[in-house]
Image (tube, grey):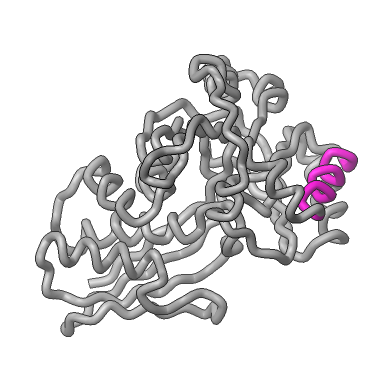
Amino acid sequence: MKCSLKAPAKINLSLDVLAKREDGFHEVEMIMTEVDLADRIDLTSRRDQQIVIQTHAGYIPADRRNLAYQAASLLRERYRISAGVTIYIQKNIPVAAGLAGGSSDAAAVLRGLNQMWGLKLSKERLAELGSEIGSDIAFCVHGGTARATGRGEKIEHLPAPPACWVVLAKPPIGVSTADVYGRVQVTNPDPANTGSRAIEQAIRDEDYRQICTHLHNDLEQVTMKLYPEVGQIKERMLESGADAALMSGSGPTVFGLVNSEGKVHRVYNALRGFCDQVYAVRLIT
């Protein structure tokens, strides 16, 4: 049997760090949505019991360090599956970029193997399993647009935001999520008055301008202090005509929202001269 799936990237329209948890993670509130930059995952059944990762990208691990491998291993062990699988990853999403590329790959593996192995598990159950591996996997299983709470694994679906262009720009650096969270100052904000609540209301009102006004990420300043080029990319985006710009996740990718096709080319070209990995994509609505 074979199965092919897309694994879309996500961006954070908001990220609020609410508190430090006893388990070492942070309590967060985020609004996340998908963009049409995606990896492709091809699953092929094997007669042996091996899980084999194949990829054209030599910079991603092809062993147990890969979240896609961990997803297949967890599903097989939890439901006593004897079959093996070859997982081919066509990598298009930048790695260590704040775009949940690895998490989206793992979510696609969970969805695909659920189908191939006839497990008939709900998305909710797949999301629970995924959250044992990584905090963003639950969102990636569900997809679309959502409010994520807890450490990111509690998902509440939201309507899609208004359609627009998204310019993504990643500098040639990798950021440690654990390092960034370890440096963030928790201010214990009012949970009823966070940036995420303002973004959620703007989405429900279908108000593109208010979404642009309320983009917010508590991790942005932490990463910018460590890597000033992140701030320079954001500044360049705004100067070249983006309606709003924000770092996604723990970075270092910065995205700019643009509601005009004419402007998106100007923003894209301005960033192409600044860093190599630049993409002009759309929100998945």
Please report the bounds of the magenta region as a residue range. Answer: 229-240
Residue 54: percent from the left, percent from the top? 41, 80
Give the left or right position of residue 245, taking residue 186 as reference.
Answer: right
Q: Quadrant of residue 147?
A: top left
Farthest bottom residue in view: 48
- What residue is shown at x 23% (from left), y 81% (from top)? 50
Q: Is residue 56 above or below residue 90?
A: below
Give percent across and percent down for residue 22.
Answer: 38, 40
Task: Kindly identify the residue that appears in the image at 43 percent across and 56 percent down.
Answer: 103
Is residue 56 visible in the rendered image? The answer is yes
For this view, does 151 lie left or right of residue 128?
right
Taken as a whole, is the magenta stretch helix, strand or loop? helix
Quadrant for residue 67, please give it.
Answer: bottom left
Left or right: where 87 falls relative to 249:
left
The percent coordinates of residue 146 (x first, y second) are 45, 33
Q: Is residue 10 above or below residue 90?
A: above
Tally of numbered discs: 0
Residue 233 on image: x %, y %: 81, 50
In front here: 110 or 28? 28
Q: Residue at x 70, y 64 (%)?
A: 173
Residue 234 included in the magenta stretch of the image? yes
At horizontal 33% and vertical 61% (from top left) the residue drawn is 109
Residue 158 lies in the magenta-colored region: no
Q: 243 above or below 169? A: above
Q: Quadrant of residue 17?
A: top right
- Residue extending furthest front? 22
Q: Is residue 265 visible?
A: no
Image quarter hosting the N terminus: bottom left
